[in-house]
Each structure stands twice: as C-alpha cells, then as structure tokens.
Amino acid sequence: MDTLISLHSTVAYVVLAFLVLSFVNALTGVLVSRGFGSRDFRLSLFGLIFSHIQLLLGVVVYFVSPYFSAWENGMGAVMKDATLRLFLVEHPTTNVLAIVLITMGWSLHKKATNSRKKFFRIAVFYGLGLLLLLSRIPWQQWP
Ligand code: HEM
C-alpha cells in the first residue's frame, strides 16, 4: 500500500516533467514554425504514456489510500473536509479530465495534416491538461 502511494508520488515528477517539456516544445514549434519531427513525436508520446501509467496507479491508490475509509461517514462528511474533498473528489476527477484532454490532444495531433497544426493541438490540449493537473496537486504535502 505505502509502496503504491510512494510510486504514485514519484511517477508524478516524471509525468509533470514530460508534460511541461511537451508543452514548451509544442509552443516553441508553433512560434518558430519548424517541422514536426520524430523527436517531437517521442516527447509527446512519453507525456501520454506516463499520464496513462499515473492514471492506472491513481485508480489503485484511490482504493488503498487511508483516506478511502472516510466514505463510510457519508458524502457530506467528505465534502465538508477540505483535505478529504481534495483527495477523494477533486484530485481524482480533475486529473481524469486532464488525462482525457491530453489523450484527445495526442489523437488530434495524429490527424493533423501539417506540422503547425500538430504542434498547436499538442500545445493547447497538453497545456490545458497540465493546468488542470497543477490546480489539484496536494501542494501542502508534495513534493
Ligand atoms: C497525472 C495524474 C496525477 C498526478 C500527477 C497525481 C499526483 C499525485 C501526488 C503528487 C500526490 C501526493 C503524493 C504524496 O503525498 O506523496 C497524489 C496523491 C493521491 N492521488 Fe494522485 N495524481 C494523479 C492522478 C490520480 C488519479 C487519476 C487518482 C484517482 C483516480 C489519484 C488518486 C490519488 C490519491 C487517492 C492520493 C492520496 C494518497 C494518499 O496519500 O493516501 N491520483 N497524487
């Protein structure tokens, strides 16, 4: 249980690092109008893969976390407590939505017919996903 939680905590660095790199890389790609190459493809793919690994880990962590038993006291008790609400409701729902956006960005970039569109779609969707993730990281206890 503790191993899974600390793995989720460690993979978070990797996910955020790849998403920041992919986003900045895509943004500069749009700004300087360069061609979308295999390095750009790989960087965004790693962002996608680690987000999905973190999603799977998060789902398991959700059920093994000591916070989970708070549901026994009902929805009202969870929603009234800011920490429980963050870990049991806000962090999971926001992060699932963020990963949906990142996945959409990935598949839309593949459908794009030119480099500018590819960079643009990655920048917008990965950027929005990243903002959502950063908004619900438990900063008071991490890193
Ligand atoms: C890319 C997506 C995600 C990132 C970057 C992320 C990041 C984090 C971080 C940094 C922590 C704090 C760990 C610590 O205190 O050492 C955490 C805790 C937690 N995360 Fe996530 N998370 C993500 C997705 C998810 C998802 C999708 C779920 C559930 C479906 C989830 C459930 C949890 C839970 C329950 C905890 C609290 C664990 C505990 O301390 O008992 N996470 N997450």
Image: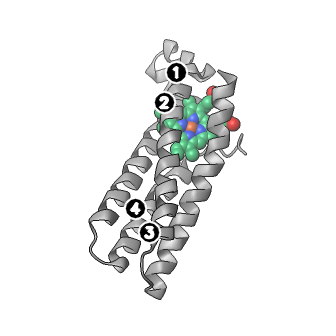
Which residue has dot 2 on it? 59
- The numbered dot on residue 63 is 1
Mark 1 belongs to which amino acid? Answer: Phe
Residue drawn at 61 percent across, 36 percent down: 8
Mark 2 vs 3, N-terminal side:
2
Under 8 Å from ligand 1: the CB of mark 3? Answer: no
Question: Regarding mark 4 in the picture, which secondary structure is present there?
Answer: helix
Q: Quadrant of residue 70?
A: top right
How many neighbours does mark 1 have within 10 angstroms: few (below 14), some (14-19), or many (20 or more)?
few
Question: Regarding mark 1 in the picture, which secondary structure is present there?
Answer: helix
Q: Quadrant of residue 84?
A: top right
Which residue has dot 4 on it? 125
The reply to whether the C-beta atoms of the residues labelled 3 and 4 are less than 8 Å apart is yes
Question: Regarding mark 2 in the picture, which secondary structure is present there?
Answer: helix
Alpha carbon distance from label 1 to label 3: 33 Å
Residue drawn at 72 percent across, 40 percent down: 141
Under 8 Å from ligand 1: the CB of mark 2? Answer: yes
Mark 1 vs 4, N-terminal side:
1
Q: What percent of the width, then of the height, locates residue 80? A: 53, 28
Which residue has dot 3 on it? 123
Mark 2 belongs to which amino acid? Answer: Val
The reply to whether the C-beta atoms of the residues labelled 1 and 4 are less than 8 Å apart is no
Mark 1 vs 3, N-terminal side:
1
Mark 2 vs 4, N-terminal side:
2
- The numbered dot on residue 53 is none
